[in-house]
Image: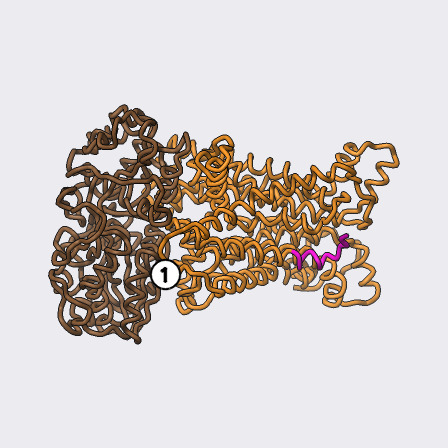
Chain colours: A brown, B orange
Amino acid sequence: MGQNTGEVGDRRNGVRRRQFVAATGVATVGVLAGCLGNGGNGSGDGEEVGGNGNGDANGGGDRVVDAEPGGEPVDSTAVSWDDLGDLEGQITIYSGRTRDQIDPVFEALEAEYDGLDIELFYDDNDVQVNQILQEGEATVADLMYSQDPGALNELEANDALQELPADVVDAVPASYRHPDGLWTGVTGRTRSIIYNSDRLDETGLEDWEELPTDIMAFDTDDRLQGVISTRPNSGTFRGFIQAMVELEGEPETREWVRGMIDHQDVQLFSGGSSQAEAINRGGDDDPVVGLGNSYYAARILNEDPDAPIRTTHTENDAGCLFSVAGVGVMNQVDDPELVAEFVRHLLAAEGQEFMMDANGEYPVVEGIDYVGPLPDLTEINPPEFDLSSFDMELQDAQDLLTEEGMTV
Amino acid sequence: MSSTPTDVETSRRPESIAERLRSVDPWMAALALSSALIALLVVSPMFWLVREAATVDPSRAYDLVVTSQTAWITVNSVVLMVAVTLLSILLGVPLAILTTRTDLPYPRAWTVVAALPLVIPSYIGAIAFVGMFGQGGELDTLFGVTVPRVDGLSGAVFIITLYTYPYVFLTTRAALLSMDGSLVDAARTLNAGPFEAFRRVTFPQIRPGIAAGALLAALYAVSDFGTPAFMGARVFTSTIYWEFGGFAVEYAALLAIQLIAIVAVVLVIEAGIGRDEDASGGTGDGSTIRLGAWKWPAMGFVSTIGAVTLVVPVAIFTNWLVRSEGDRIASLEFQPEFALNSVYLAVLAALVAAAFALPVAYYSGRVNSTISRLLERATYLGFAVPGIVIGLALVFLGTRTVPSLYRDGVALLVFAYVVRFLPQAVGTTRASVLGIDDTLLEAARTLDSGRIETFRRVTLPLIMPGVVAGAVLVFLTTMKELPMTLMLQPVGMDTLVIIIWEAQRGLYYRYAAIPALLLLVISGLTMIVSLRQEGYEIG
């Protein structure tokens, strides 16, 4: 339960930031040397806490941003693993992604490099972020692999991340990463409409083609009354709300949320798996249609090709928000070269292709073509967003949902 | 200070501090001190909550506390807690009587069946139940048979009860086994009917046992996240998770403190009900209730519970194992280490909890003072706080105090289990301490046996069943713990429940089949062993 995407912001109330300053202050043994000064975030109170002052072996200049490529640099074309430097040593990753999503590429990397040891900690995406923030400089993570940009933005807002090397940053289009390269997307996906193809007659629709292609029609379309569902506690949903505010305005977004609850009697789920499962199961009280992420449907179909669950999408609106899963590097890492080279591997051709294959996700590197069952991105035409800064901050989107009563 | 005469005449005069110190029994002082240290240790994570909550702007904090939403979740949480507790008593007490006081065949086997639901995470039970009995579920698909929709608050009550009543069952059963059954016979010979005898003789004797189990059930119900979330019931835990998702840990902490405040009230109430409780006395067996033909419906009843709570989850997962056409996911493939890790962690947690529980339980069982009761009650707080909150508190405190142990070795994780599960050991151990017949201790003393000698040779053997029962409870609940395990595990230390969770959240149920089956087998064997040490004869 932690599939997320899409929020942002340099955020948040001073309270939060003070708290983090206090938290890290306790542990800070060394001098706050080598601060990146990620700049501009927070309300500016408190001192910079972004340095690698944990008293570890690393010197102040030993930053990931300075790590020279071990082989070729990556760029927006398909660079092969063969041209990159070797990976050797131990790298520790906090993953908010599930095992099936990242196992294939990590297995391939460990098979490729005998000296590479990838240590993985799995948990819900949101829990990982909260944990890293509580650990402060004592975190054992080198890297956070997040389901969504919102979680990475939260880490960035608390000065927990350090800058990525220039070639890595330049390999990814600006809207899929942090502008200063404090995190980068690795693969992307759009939000989808999920439905049970056996239950058309329980909707007011004549044909599945009649499903609205405009997300702003979902709160008023009587044909979906009582049969629609969503999951409001995911990162992708918060990103979706942020995107809607940006595209349509806050009053319209509030109206949409209220309409979903009051008019459509939307069923709310607390987990993406249980939502997709309920749609697929198709009991009388289960929803027929859902707003969510398409990969749950893909997994069900992978297990059981005869399952009735299907996905479609809206067009060029918040409902088909394109968001990324991505990585951010912790402030303090043991081996900056290894971490930098590791991220390069994720953005190189094989890394992108493994992810594409395992997750049904789109590559973020332009030179790599998407091959798979999903519609071409130009067909969906998702709106362009800077995923590192929506107009509305994440906490405000969360508050909006709480105020309008769309919580689980 | 001069010494004062110590004859009887002067003993009513106000004593000097030195005098009072001298009159303190050093053994009891040491006991009190170690109880206090243990209580302080397990309550320490709560300081993190206060620290976090203190960062919330006071006006915002006020708004949070008094919103209608907070009122709503408070009501829901209390309803959930009360309903689960009452239903657990209605289920657990008859089952305990059935397996101890009647001629039910194979009582040990039925005891294991009735206790085992404790080891299944309740949300897994919820998913399996809906998948089997719900509309569109397996039975619906095969036979067109469904049960009424199970969801919302009532659904959460139903499912949590099914997986929580074993607390009441086990503690009541222990009380029944240790009470003097011959009293019931005496009552019957005085022409009391069976219900009259139960109400006037048995019930007062086992009331502390029922209360102890009911308390555990109540605290479990109020700290459970997975099942209310799956059922869509809005309670404290769901709101805590909601704030967690918005990265507002300080709000989550504030909510957790509110939850603790409610629980504190419950703890005080229960302290009244469970009072006292000097359950000492003989342990005559008494005659058993003859079921006759009723043994068939009785066995049918226990079998049904076992089928719904234990067989259904395993069957659902196994069905996927057989049917699935999905791709292989390397790190979810079963490895024996998963089981070994689970057992290793659970054994450590059980041992440490038993050791920690002993002084607290003994002190509060032997000395009936406000302080001793307070220390004992304090150990219960951790059980009411969702694991994710305790986990985060220990992440913060662990990295600040013992960074070398953080995510390196299992010490911090085992401590986390003890923080949450200690009351299970304290409760059962204390019940057995209350059951000690003082005359035995006096007899030992008159035989010039020293304090340590008496404790080792008389007290410890007497309370051992309670200590073991507590350790087993901790073992079983540690086996199913998830959130703290994820947050504090050393790298790669996957447990059975971690794999079940991964399989569930990724919709790869087939990978949950073997871990779920093993969870039941290992826990069942553990129970059989622990029942054996009770030494009750089975046909």
Describe residue A190's horizontal placement relative to residue B222 as left or right: left
Q: Quadrant of residue A250?
A: top left
Q: Which residue is mark 1?
A: A121
Camera-nearest residue between B473 and B66: B473
Q: Chain of mark 1?
A: A
Give the amino acid at mark 1. Answer: Phe
Q: Which residues are magenta?
A: B528-539
Seen in the image, is B252 located left or right of residue B95?
left
Q: Is residue B22 visible?
A: yes
Instruction: Assess whether residue B531 is covered by the magenta stretch.
Output: yes
Residue A306 located within the stretch drawn in magenta: no
Compare residues A330 and A3 and report the one nearer the observer: A3
**Looking at the image, which residue sits at the far right?**
B189
Q: Residue B497, image x and y in percent?
A: 47, 55
**Left or right: where does residue A96 sit relative to residue B335?**
left
Question: In this orientation, which residue lies closer to the viewer: B397 or A235?
Answer: A235
Q: Residues within 10 Å of mark 1 (few under 14, many from 20)?
A: many
Left or right side of B468 for A177: left
Residue A7: % across, % down: 23, 46
Q: Residue at (24%, 71%) from the top-left corner?
A: A338
The quadrant of the image that shows the C terminus of chain A is: top left
Q: Secondary structure at mark 1?
A: strand
